[in-house]
Structure formats: C-alpha cells, structure tokens
Amino acid sequence: MLRIATEDDRRLQLIEATIETLAEVGFGATTLALIGRRAGVSPGLVSHYFGDKDSLLEATLRHMASRVGRAAGRRLASARTPRERVHAVIEANLAPEEFDRRTGSVWLAFWGQVIHSQRLRRVQVVYQKRMLSNLRHALRALVSSADAERIAVATAAIIDGLWLRATLSDTHETDSSSARAIAVAFVDSSVEAAVKAGSLPAPRPTRMSSIIRNHVGGRPVDAAERKTFETINPATGEVLAEVEIAGAAEVDAAVAAARAGQKLWARMTGTERGRVLKRVADLLRARNDELARLETQDTGKPIQETSVVDVISGADCIEYYAGLAASLAGEHIDLGPSAFGYTRREPLGIVAGIGAWNYPLQIACWKSAPALACGNAMIFKPAELTPLTAVKLAEIMAEAGVPDGVFNVVQGFADTGRLLTRHPGIAKVSLTGEVGTGMKVMADAATTLKQVTLELGGKSPLIVFEDADLDNAVSGALLANFYSAGEVCSNGTRVFVHRSVKAAFLEKLVARVKKMVVGDPLDPRTQVGALISAGHMEKVLGYIEKGIAEGAKLAVGGKRVTAGALARGAFVQPTVFDACEDGMAIVREEIFGPVMTVLSFDTEDEVIARANATEFGLAAGVFTRDLTRGHRAVAALEAGTCWINHYNITPIELPFGGVKRSGLGRENGKAAIEHYTQLKSVYVALAPIDAPY
C-alpha cells in the first residue's frame, strides 16, 4: 500500500473506500470494518479520523457534493454570459463522472437515506440550494425574477430527473452528453418563450419603496415628526430605502399596542402560541430567497451565506421555541399533609430587543422567539445600518396570526434605543451590541430595575495545539475570522499556534486565504462581501495600518479592494498578521473585520493564561486530537461559549453568551426561557389556620 503523505490524504483515502463499499454492498450493509478492510486499515483507525459511521457517511456526502460544487465554480468562472452561466451549472451537475455507474449508485444510496437522517438532509439541502441559487442568479439577467424562479426550479427538477433515470435504467438510454443536451434545450426554449411573452430582467433594485415606516400594532404607522434616514447598500453605495425614525410618540404607541396584544397572547396556551410561531418559521423558509437577497443588499454579506444561514437559522430558532412553548410549566412542592405549594412560570410582559447590524434578521428571531414563546410581547429596534428585514419579519408575524401588538418594530438611532431602555412600561431589554452600548443600556435599565440580557463584543482566542489536525484547524481559523467579512462578535481573531507547527499552519492558511473570492455579494461565487459601511471600512483599514506600524508582519491581504465596480463599495481583503505580540492594538482590541492575528506559544499553561488576559470573554476555541486536553483547556478558558475542534457553530439548542465584559445572560437553548419568565410561588392550605390570637 502507498504511504499516505498527509492527514487529508488519509481522510480522502477513507472516503474513497467508503464510496467503493457503498457501491458494492449498499448503505445498510456498509460498516467501518468493511471500509477499513477496503482501505487496508483497522476499523479503529477509521474511527480515529471520523468517530462513527454516521460521521463518515456525512463526510462522504459532503465530499461528493463539494466535488460538484467545485466543478460548477470552475465552469462559472470561465462563463462570460448569463446563458453560459446557466449551461455551466447544468454541465457540472450532469458531468460524465456523475453518470458513472459506481458514483450514481452511491448518490442514489444517499438520497434514499436523507429522509431518515437529519445530518444527511442538511448536506442535501445546502447542495440543492446552491444549485438553485446559481441558476436563479444567471436567469435573472435574462428574464423577470418570477420567470427566473420558475425556470430555475424546473431546470433543477429536470437535472435530478435525468440523472435519476440514467442511474436506475439498465438500457443506458441517457448518458451525460444527451442529458446535458436535453437540459440545455429546455432552458434555452424556456428563456426564449419567456422573452417572447414580454418577460424582461428587472433592474437591480436600489429602493424597497419611498418610505419604510415603523411597524406598530400589526401595521405600518406614520411617524409624528416624519424624520427619516437613508439605508445604504454597502457594496454599491446605492440608497436602498428611506426609513422613518421613531420618536417618543411612536415608542409610547408601541408600548400601548404591546400591552394590549400581550394580554391576549399570554392567555393563549403554550400549544396555541407554538402553533402560530411554527407558521412564522414556515413562512420564513418559504421566503428564504427573497429575504436572503434583501439581507445581502442591506448588509453586504455574500448571498452564499445569507441564502443558507441568516434566514434559515432564524426560522430554526422560532421553530425550536415554538416546540418549547407547550412545555413551559412550574413545579409542585409537597409541604406535608396540611399544605402544598406550586410555582407558576409567567411572562415578564413587554420586552425590548435591540439588534446589531451583522445578523439583522437572525438576531431579531433570536430575541423574539423565546420572548414570544413565553407569552411576552416584544418591541424590536434593529440597527440603523440594517433596518429592512426586521420589518419583513413583522409582516410575516402578522400574516402568521401573531396578534396585533405582540411584535413591533421601531426604527432609529441611539435616541430611539434610549426611549426603550428608559421606558417604565418595558420590563426587560435584550441587546446585542458593543460593550460601551451595553454599559449604557444597563445603567438606563437600573433606573426602573429592568432585567437585561447583554450579548456584547469579544476578542476571542483560538488555540491550535501541536497535535491538531492542521487542515481542520485552518478551516476553523478561516470560519473564525472571515465568515461575514469578519463581522462576527464571537470571532477567534487571536489565533495562538504552537511554535512547533506554526510555520506549517501559516503556509496552509495563507494558501487558502489567497484563493478566497472577494466580490459582488449577490454573485453566488463571492465568499467575502462588503463591510457594513465606508466608515467601518476606514476603521478596519486604520487597524491594519496600526498593525504594520506596531511591527506585525503582513502575511496576506491588508488592502482595500477597488477592482471595477467594487470601488464603489466597502471591500477589504482577508488579512492575516504574523509575528504578533500580546500588547499590540490589533491583538487587544476588537476590530470587527477580516483581520486575523497569529501568535506563537510553547506550553498549555502559558497559552491559557495569555488567552484569558483580556477584558472580553465571549468565546474560545481549541484544536487538538487529545480530547482530555481539549476538555481541560476549555474548562480553564474564561469564555461563555467554547468549541473543541470547530468554531462559530451556534446550534439553537445550545445557550450562547459571554462572561466578563462580553455580556450577561444567555440566548438560545432552554436557558433563554429563564430570562423571559418570572416565577410566582403559591402556597395552598389544606387545613384550618391555627391562629394564636
């Protein structure tokens, strides 16, 4: 057997052995022992790399889906016209290698299992959404958005149908070449027919409407003073919409509407509230593409992110709390033969949510879902830089049957936020934002003893020990620094790498960063979009200049991107600094952009102490093959959310939040229920009172 040169080679060898085994014996009969035998290794070694059969099968499906995705990316990169881009997607998905009998049988085995496996289903959903997204993006340049949607869905179905027929048929009636010809002919004829019928591509929208109003009591309302601000597409500099600012009159109206709506909402059973919230989640998923596009325009984030994360994760959160709503209950307490007690878990009443601009819709869902599940009403103020999708959420809530006043949206700047944090009719404030803002909110809340949940900033450590899988660690570091152009509060921007493997880590890291695509956020190929604003871009570039001045070594990136149309937007290259020291500003201060700092360490005790030497404590990550050390390290790290051999994954079932100056309280998971309810204790006497008077 040939010597395996790298860890990736070994993983790939085992995945290929899995494909061969699945093709030979099928899904049910495939075991780690059979895979190991085919690969010439022990089942224990297979377990070492992948854990269990389910994890290996998931990795294999991801490998096959990624192979098609990379093929599509290569073809799309060379396509010069929208029509060629559509053809490129078809050619990648119906390529000769996908029609190979062995490959086809394995694809078929996986598709037969997705209805039984949530893990495989997730991979399939991403795979299918990317194909649809690529088709839609190209078709929208040829026909209207409605026709683009119709033709994209039909084309995807034809691709799947042609492949399935070829895989199941023993007559070889359809090969790759004829399948591609059939699909291309369908698209070309459909586009031609649509154009003849008058279907024209819509110009890229620059405005949602003339004025976006506050949403109070289930409907848009006019602001008394009619003051407005503009929201800008940070990728193009274009005005998306003009937004009315909520003043004292609008906030008072929102509180009054919330008070009326909350009484009705709280009287409903948890099951009834959950049923309504489930409809909200369903509507979000049904409008994923529309909302993802709007989120991309408002934030500058790539459509390849917003179409599979931002809207879907919000829907997942609402669905999770819809399921929990019916389970909310108090406790029965036995107090002997003459009495018993019980507790009631009751809503707080009216709560305010104040969002951040990096995940506008997701944050609105993270705050409103537990609040509404518990029977509260919410007044939500989105960040002034990203005001659009919260209004869409309010419209969806109303359509789903959430009573008027239970979810309200007020727009504005810090003054509007202060009207909420100081209002005596509001029982709680939940903020996602900067540390300074959190301190001001907490001070305001103290005047009326409001409860607060604060999810604030971070400067989180990511530790790579000498025994880590370096390719996996590099993947984690990329997610921890460059997803959403680095505008993520939990980012692991202080990357501590053991001195013995730092050179190898940097080599792999820099090579992958150089391949990252910075571009138009609405292009599915783009991996790094625009920063939130020109002002924020200047702040990030200023930190890069400061890092160079302090003596850090620029390993890759470091410049604004101004090629072609990108010159109109706020684009910055993914940036990696080497030779960093703990005292540098780029290491100590939150930059909130695509800037990674890499530092060396020698011992575990040393790196834990350095990782904890910060005022922040939001998150931390550890990469090691030694799980004992991994658990020991995260136990010693002063952070509210930690990952072992991963980073920035936030399942809704797991509480999220920080310690130290990174916040108070938790969002997500069952823990959030504690922050949106209050306990009432009830004593019930079963015997006459024995009064001494």
Image (tube, helix red, strand yellow):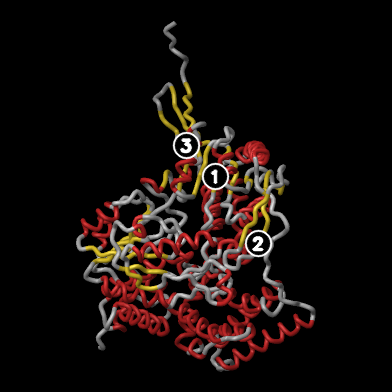
Q: Position of residue 364 (x, y in %)?
A: 56, 52
Task: Specify the quadrant of the image occupied by residue 292.
Answer: bottom right
Q: Amino acid at mark 2?
A: Leu
Determine whether the residue tagged by mark 3 lies in a helix, strand or loop.
helix
Q: Residue at x 43, y 62 (%)?
A: 542
Left or right, 575 with reference to 356: left
Task: Specify the quadrant of the image occupied by residue 632.
Answer: bottom left
Residue 129 visible to an observer of this rendering: no
Q: Quadrant of the C terminus?
A: top left
Q: Residue at x 51, y 48 (%)?
A: 324
Q: Quadrant of the N terminus?
A: bottom left
Determine whether the residue tagged by mark 2 lies in a helix, strand or loop.
strand
- Answer with mark 3 or mark 2, whichever residue precedes in sequence: 2
Q: Residue at x 49, y 49 (%)?
A: 432
How much space separates mark 1 and mark 3, taking CA atoms? 22 Å
Residue found farthest to the top:
693
How much space separates mark 3 and mark 2, taking CA atoms? 34 Å
Determine whether the residue tagged by mark 1 lies in a helix, strand or loop.
helix
Left or right, 195 with reference to 677: right
Left or right, 290 with reference to 112: right
Residue denoted by label 3: 443
Q: Residue at x 71, y 82 (%)?
A: 191
Q: Position of residue 457 (x, y in %)?
A: 42, 52
The disc at residue 371 is 1
Q: Position of residue 342 (x, y in %)?
A: 46, 31
Residue denoted by label 2: 240
- Rendered position, 459 above or below 594: above
Which of pointers 2 and 1 indicates the residue nearer the eye? Answer: 2
Q: Position of residue 131 (x, y in %)?
A: 56, 77
